[in-house]
Image (cartoon, rainbow, N blue to C red):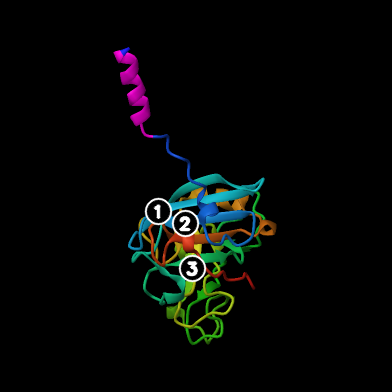
Amino acid sequence: MRLALVLASVLLLAPAAPVDREPLPARMADTGGGTQLITAEAPHARSTTGTVTWWDRRGGRWVRVGSAQARFGANGLVEGARRRQGTSTTPTGLYPFPYAFGIETAPPGTAFPYRRVTRDSWWCQDNRSRAYNRWVEGLPAHCRAAEAEHLISYGRRYAHALVIGFNYERPVRGRGAGIFLHVKGRGPTAGCVAVPAGAMRRILAWAEPARRPHIAIGTSGGGRTAIVRTGARESAAP
């Protein structure tokens, strides 16, 4: 009898099994309205590492498809609307993907429009140029080479990439240019999100423009950079 009472008391005092939390996209303020989503989550705003996860919406629920370790800017993350060019920070927020590009040919299954990098391919970051935050084929006179990325010089890091539509539709001078999801190198980035080469290939084979994928960048903690608070989105105008 005493043993039965002890067992009963143990069962009553034992903590209840933890309730599974909803998938991250289900807890976010906005996911872009499509049925595919990439989340790029860092532990806090000063982090340079974190996790990229890609999700499908199936039967009204978000399902994790894959994930990979990620690198962020050398100076961490900052709210997109408050970012300043040249700060080596990754902008938080919700953004579309205008198109993909790469030094190598597109991985099999790639559905996004894909631009192949040539020796004349540049990304203009010159605040005085009318091509600010745009790909240019052949560097125009109004875009200084010192204020542009010569894409082919980035080697394996730009083997494959997706343009993140940060400050893209209506560029604000001084906010930042050339923010991509690309293959990671040895350290943090200058503001991009980077993943291993295999993960980048899998993401390109998975992403479908018709399903309107977006990337949500943020932190798991609170405050303005929290990923669950991702705010106004930017459209993917060319």
- Which secondary structure type mostly characterizes the magenta part of the structure? helix
- Residue 192: in magenta span: no
Residue drawn 50% across the image and 68% down it: 151
Residue to which mark 2 is pinned? 40
* Amino acid at pointer 2: Ala
- The quarter of the rendered structure image containing the N terminus is top left
Query: Magenta region: which residues?
Result: 2-15
Q: Nearer the viewer, mark 3 or mark 1?
A: 1
- Name the one closer to the observer, 54 or 224: 224
User: Is there any visible trace of residue 107 in the rendered image?
Assistant: no
Identify the mark nearer the N-term, 3 or 1: 1
Identify the mark nearer the N-term, 2 or 1: 2
Residue to which mark 3 is pinned? 179
Q: Secondary structure at mark 1?
A: strand
Q: Secondary structure at mark 3?
A: loop
* Amino acid at pointer 3: Ile
Residue to which mark 1 is pinned? 50
Q: Are marks 2 and 1 in contact (CB under 8 Å)?
A: yes
Alpha carbons under labels 3 and 2: distance apart: 13 Å
- Name the one closer to the observer, 86 or 158: 86
* Amino acid at pointer 1: Gly
